[in-house]
C-alpha cells in the first residue's frame, strides 16, 4: 500500500502536545519517517548538517566516548559520524516517537555500539553525566520553552553539548499554521485555520532565539561553562537546493543569498557549543 493511502486512513485531528508540538507533524507522519529512514540507510544523500555535526564531533570525541543524539529520528546522524570517526565510540539516539525509533532499531541492529531509546528532551530518560558529549540538531526551533530542555541535555552530559538551532539578534516566536491544502496530515480546511480567538488550531513552532537569551540561559544554568557560537556555513548551496526538490517536503530548506530559508522565513542556523571543561 502506498504512503498516501495509508495516510488517508489515519487520524488527522490536530493534536498539540503539552510542550506545544504539533504531533501530526511527527507522531504518525509516514512521509517524514520515510525521509529520515532513507537518510539513515543511505538511500538519500547525507544531510549537509549531519556532515557538519560529524566534523565538529571528530575534533572532540575521545576513544570510547558516549555520544547522545537528542531528536535522532532514524539515526541518520550516526551514518555521518561513523563514516568520519574511526575511534571506538558509543552512540545513543533518543526521540519521543516510535514511528522513527522502530525503524532506527531495526536498521542499525547489527551495529553493536548503537542503541535507541524513547525519550523526550523535557525529561530525558538518562542519568546525570551519563554521556560525554550530547548533541541536538533542529529540535530547539520547534520547542515552546527551551529552559527545561537546556537543563536536561546539560544534566545528562559530562563534557560538551552541541545545539544546532536558529539564532538572531532578537527572538521571534513563530507559529507555522497547518491546513489540509498543503499539509496532508491535518483535517483543518484553510477557512478554519484560526479559532474564534484568532489562535491557530494546528501549528508548529519555528522559533528564532536571541543570542542573549540562549547565552544567558545557559550561563544561569552553568555559570562556569564556556560557550562558543558558530554560524553554520558548512553547506553547499546546490546540495541543499537539490535535496529540496528530491525529497519533495513542503517548506524544506532552500538557500536565498547566503541564508537558509524555510517558506518565507530566514533561518540563520548556528552551532552552540557548550564546554563544561573549565581547565
Ligand atoms: C526536524 S527533526 C530533526 C531531526 C535531526 N535531528 C536532524 O537535524 O535532521 C526534529 C526531531 O526532533 C524530534 N522531537 C520533537 N520533539 C521532541 C522532544 N520534545 N524531545 C526530543 N525530540 C523531539 C522529532 O521527533 C524529530 O525526530
Image: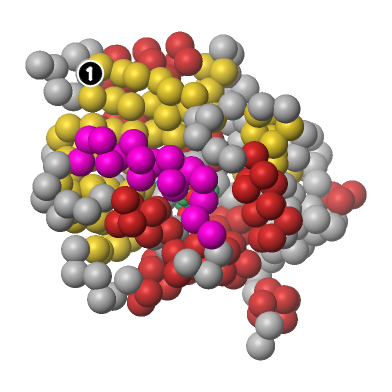
- Residue under the point 34% across and 19% down: 228
Give residue 2's position: percent from left, percent from top: 68, 83
- Residue under the point 42% across and 72% down: 103
Q: Is residue 33 above or below residue 23?
A: below
Viewer-proximal residue, 31 or 91?
91
Does residue 33 appear anywhere in the picture?
Answer: no
Q: Is residue 142 above or below residue 102?
A: above
The boundaries of the magenta stretch are 45-61
Q: Is residue 51 shown in magenta?
A: yes
Q: How is the image coloured?
A: secondary structure
Residue 64 placement, left or right of 256: left
- Which element type, helix, strand or loop, lies under badge 1? loop
- Residue under the point 33% across and 56% down: 83
Q: In terms of secondary structure, what is the magenta stretch mainly?
A: helix
Does residue 26 appear anywhere in the picture?
Answer: yes
Residue 240 placement, left or right of 106: right
Give residue 23's position: percent from left, percent from top: 56, 56
Q: Is residue 173 shown in magenta?
A: no
Viewer-proximal residue, 159 or 219?
159
Q: Residues within 10 Å of mark 1 (few under 14, many from 20)?
A: some
Given the current orientation, which residue lies at the most extreme right position?
Answer: 191
Give residue 26's position: percent from left, percent from top: 55, 58
Q: Which residue is mark 1?
A: 225
- Residue under the point 50% across and 34% down: 234
Amino acid at each position: 500500500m502506498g504512503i498516501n493511502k495509508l495516510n488517508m486512513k489515519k487520524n488527522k485531528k490536530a493534536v498539540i502536545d503539552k510542550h506545544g508540538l504539533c504531533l501530526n507533524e511527527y507522531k504518525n507522519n509516514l512521509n517524514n519517517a520515510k525521509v529520515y529512514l532513507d537518510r539513515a540507510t543511505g538511500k538519500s544523500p547525507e544531510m549537509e548538517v549531519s556532515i557538519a555535526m560529524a566534523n565538529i564531533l571528530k575534533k572532540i570525541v575521545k576513544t570510547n566516548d558516549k555520544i547522545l543524539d537528542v531528536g535522532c529520528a532514524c539515526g541518520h546522524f550516526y551514518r555521518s559520524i561513523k563514516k568520519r570517526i574511526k575511534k571506538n565510540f558509543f552512540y545513543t539516539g533518543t526521540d519521543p516517537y516510535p514511528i522513527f525509533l522502530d525503524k532506527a532499531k531495526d536498521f542499525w541492529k547489527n551495529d553493536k555500539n548503537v542503541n535507541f531509546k524513547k525519550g523526550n528532551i523535557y525529561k530525558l530518560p538518562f542519568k546525570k553525566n551519563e554521556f560525554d558529549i550530547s548533541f541536538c540538531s533542529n529540535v530547539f526551533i520547534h520547542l515552546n520553552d527551551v529552559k527545561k530542555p537546556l537543563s536536561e541535555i546539560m544534566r545528562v552530559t559530562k563534557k560538551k553539548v552541541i545545539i544546532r538551532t536558529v539564532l538572531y539578534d532578537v527572538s521571534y516566536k513563530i507559529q507555522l499554521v497547518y491546513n489540509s491544502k498543503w499539509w496532508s496530515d491535518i483535517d483543518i480546511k484553510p477557512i478554519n485555520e484560526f479559532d474564534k480567538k484568532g489562535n491557530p488550531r494546528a501549528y508548529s513552532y519555528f522559533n528564532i532565539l536571541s543570542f542573549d537569551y540562549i547565552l544567558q540561559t545557559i550561563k544561569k544554568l552553568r555559570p562556569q561553562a564556556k560557550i562558543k557560537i558558530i554560524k553554520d556555513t558548512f553547506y553547499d548551496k546546490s546540495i541543499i537546493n537539490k535535496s529540496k526538490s528530491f525529497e519533495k517536503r513542503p517548506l524544506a530548506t532552500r538557500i536565498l543569498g547566503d541564508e537558509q530559508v524555510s517558506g518565507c522565513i530566514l533561518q540563520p542556523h548556528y552551532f552552540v557549543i557548550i564546554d563544561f571543561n573549565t581547565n
